[in-house]
Image (cartoon, helix red, strand yellow):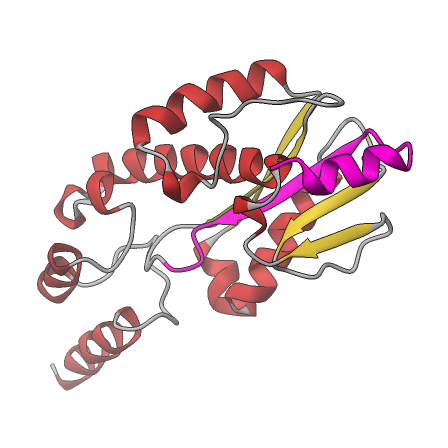
Amino acid sequence: MREYEDELLKKGITLVAGVDEVGRGPLIGPVVTAAVILPKGYQNDEINDSKKLTEKKREKLYDIIMKDAVDVSIGICSEKEIDNINILEATKKAMKEAINGLKTKPEHVLIDAVKLDINIPATSIIKGDAKSISIAAASIIAKVYRDRLLIEMDKEYPMYNLAKNKGYGTKTHIEALNKYGPCKYHRLTFEPVKTIHANLVNKEKLK
């Protein structure tokens, strides 16, 4: 998990930011990104791709990373922006926001999969959250942060079961969409939200 960081360290580069996103696939809510700068030579064998960790383990590691990191920054792009500019552009925008939000300027940025147009040397790594400790740390921060947002949304709209499905298109989520229609947080350009919303609009017009 330190291969990329150690290569940079050999070149004298110690301030490395890992960047990752969470929430490209869900039907509801924002896409959330995190940029994390870990201390030089930092090692924690428990840090891994957030998708491979239990919720309990992510919560524990979130607190450890927040305490140990040199710097952490969050970037958010709302569901409205996702609908306006598409999910890839929204992800890039949120990633740039996270990088720009760092108080400590990184010397190099390691990014999970996405290529960014930024004025800092950067490396895009496919499946980076499983290959770089910095990106994995960012994936944990972004995942826990977004999950907490969805738990708050669930209090407002309990019918969609968001605290459990975290906005993904599960059977209960789709059933609730068909019954109640989308709420203000749903992504109206994502299927099946798009079709369900269009059908409701057409029904209103026919009244």
Q: Give the left or right position of residue 175, taking residue 162 as reference.
A: left
Residue furthest out toward the top: 67
The part of the image, by quadrant, that contains residue 148 is top left
Viewer-closest of 76 and 25: 25
The quadrant of the picture occupied by the C terminus is: bottom left
Q: Is residue 41 found inside the magenta-colored segment of the image?
A: no
Q: Is residue 9 found inside the magenta-colored segment of the image?
A: yes
The part of the image, by quadrant, that contains residue 85 is bottom right
Q: Give the left or right position of residue 51, taking residue 196 as reference.
A: right
Residue furthest out toward the bottom: 206
Number of marks drawn = 0
Image location of residue 13, percent across then percent down: 87, 34
Up/down of 11 relative to 203, above or below: above
Image location of residue 17, percent across then percent down: 72, 37
Viewer-closest of 135 and 33: 135
Q: Where does the magenta region start and end? A: 1-25
Image location of residue 87, percent across then percent down: 51, 64
Image location of residue 92, percent across then percent down: 63, 57
Q: Residue at x 18, y 63 (%)?
A: 181
Q: Give the left or right position of residue 48, taking residue 59 as reference.
A: right
The quadrant of the picture occupied by the N terminus is: top right
